Image (cartoon, grey):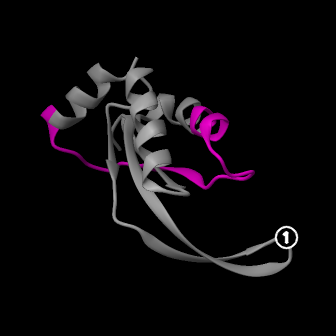
Amino acid sequence: MTGIATVYAVFADEAEAARIGRAMVEAGLAACVNILAPCRSIYRWQGAIEEAIEIPALFKTRADRAEALIAAIAVAHSYDVPAAIAWPIAAAHGPYESWVSQEVS
């Protein structure tokens, strides 16, 4: 296992993903964020089946900062219950892992 993690989150639109992504990099909680193409989400919310177009994003961070990053995303997010989860990274290119670790405070 490496010392880095990827945090996955979805956002209401590209502007929100970019605003929060930039804020997390500026705050030193993420080294990088990849904002992906829109996705179609189907989910149950408050007893009803809903569908929405959302913007997924991948945040690269240190494993020991993933929980703080998730908490900061949740505070800045427009959803009542934002999806924000961390995936541990089993293997990474050594220089990339070092770069992520150096960029996250």
Q: Is residue 48 above or below residue 18?
A: below
Question: Magenta residues, as a range?
Answer: 71-95
**SS at mark 1 in the image:** loop
Name of the residue lying farthest toward the top? 105
Name the one closer to the observer, 73 or 38.
38
Which quadrant: the N terminus? top left
Which residue in the structure is indicated by mark 1?
46
Position of residue 103 in the picture relative to residue 52 (left or right): left
Asked whether 36 or 70 is in front, the reply is 36
Q: How many marks?
A: 1
What residue is at 45 percent from the left and 20 percent from the top?
27
Q: Amino acid at mark 1?
A: Gln
Residue 8 position in % (x across, y down): 47, 53
| Label 1 CA crowd tier, 10 Å (few <14, some 14–19, many 20+) | few
Residue 52 spot, x, y in % from top left: 58, 73
| Residue 43 rendering spot, x and y as whole percentages | 67, 76
**Residue 49, horizontal then vertical, whole percent:** 74, 82
Viewer-proximal residue among 18 and 45: 18
